[in-house]
Amino acid sequence: MRFANWSLALPGVNEHDYPLIEAQRTMSTRLTENDVTPEPLYRERRLFIVSAAAALGASWAGRNAIAAPSPVVDKPNTLEEISSYNNYYEFSTNKEAVRVLAQALSTSPWNLTVEGEVAKPFTIGVEDLLKRFFIEERICRLRCVEGWSMVIPWNGFPLHKLIDLAQPTGQAKYIEFVSLLRPKEMIGQRQSSLDWPYREALRLDEARHPLAFMATGLYGQTLPKQNGAPLRLVVPWKYGFKQPKAITHIRFLRDIPKTSWQQIAPTEYGFYGNVNPDVAHPRWSQRRENRIGELRKRPTLPFNGYAQDVAHLYAGLDPKLLF
Ligand SMILES: Nc1nc2c(c(=O)[nH]1)N[C@H]1C(S)=C(S)[C@@H](COP(=O)(O)O)O[C@H]1N2
Ligand SMILES: [Mo]
């Protein structure tokens, strides 16, 4: 019954914070049911994938009142599936090896530095960061550009809350995320499979979208190291490579930065990385995906099923150019 006590298991939260967690339950769209449910039952409930409506804090009951949310019903993958098949090149290009190798990473203490075009640059320990925000749950699809997908119940907080702390200047147009550089513990960094550290970026307005999320846990537990502990970006309408793990720096920039993947394979990875079944990868189609745990492939949805929530961000731009 790992869930009986899940809120106390959240990183950086101790007994004294319990009233805070209670408040989060009231605010959240669905924590009241799931926080005491063991994982298998939890999965059987066929939970709704969170949409912007839920992300904006609409109550579960009030959700129907909101025009056109994205009521996509999907079953979360198991904790075992989510934590045993991972892309994390800092450790290995072998998905099954990551789980073992990532345990060498020490995730505490951990500092996050927020800098660049901001009124208030700061460095904060992750434990302190966690105490500042309500820890919400977000059940999101993850679609890897390689053609597989999962459904993951993350815990964390919306990225815009962090952006508001930093107060970007009028010059800030992009936001860059930098993952940890520590070849002593990350043995994959001794190879040049990528230009280290791993760097990704968003347009600032994309980053402010309520679906952009900083994950600090999953299934109500501390984030497994292989999934990006202690701090990992979740941008569910984009391919997995746009969702960096083990973030140490967030930089607000005037100009569009080059990401690690664009640098190593500019013809295969665009800046946007929006999930789009109509734009093939140079080496394979993106029309269908293999949901881990399922036998038959399923169709890939535009913006990974979040089109109603995010398509407006790209109004006037040719969606084909948005990969
Ligand atoms: N730092 C870092 N972040 C990363 C990666 C990586 O290699 N290093 N891989 C990305 C890719 S390609 C995918 S598909 C997702 C996989 O996330 P998961 O292992 O939690 O399912 O992480 C993304 N974030
Ligand atoms: Mo990926």
Image (cartoon, helix red, strand yellow):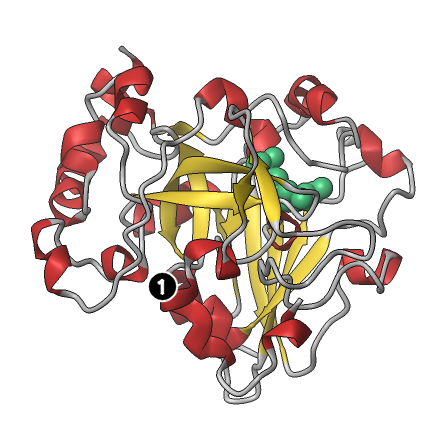
Please give left or right for residue 105 compared with residue 143 in the image: right
Between 77 and 131, the residue placed more toward the observer is 77
Q: Position of residue 21 (x, y in %)?
A: 19, 38
Q: Position of residue 53 (x, y in %)?
A: 24, 61
Please give left or right for residue 172 compared with residue 158 in the image: right
Image quarter in which the N terminus is found: top left
In the rendered image, the vertical position of residue 128 relative to residue 9, given as above or below: below
Please give left or right for residue 159 compared with residue 121 in the image: left
The residue drawn where x is 36% and y is 38% is 74
Residue sitting at the far left? 61
In the rendered image, the vertical position of residue 241 relative to residue 35, given as above or below: below
Q: Position of residue 319 (x, y in %)?
A: 59, 74
For label 1, the SS is loop
Q: Position of residue 8 (x, y in %)?
A: 27, 25
Amino acid at circle 1: Pro
Q: Which residue is mark 1?
A: 210
The residue drawn where x is 33% and y is 24% is 9
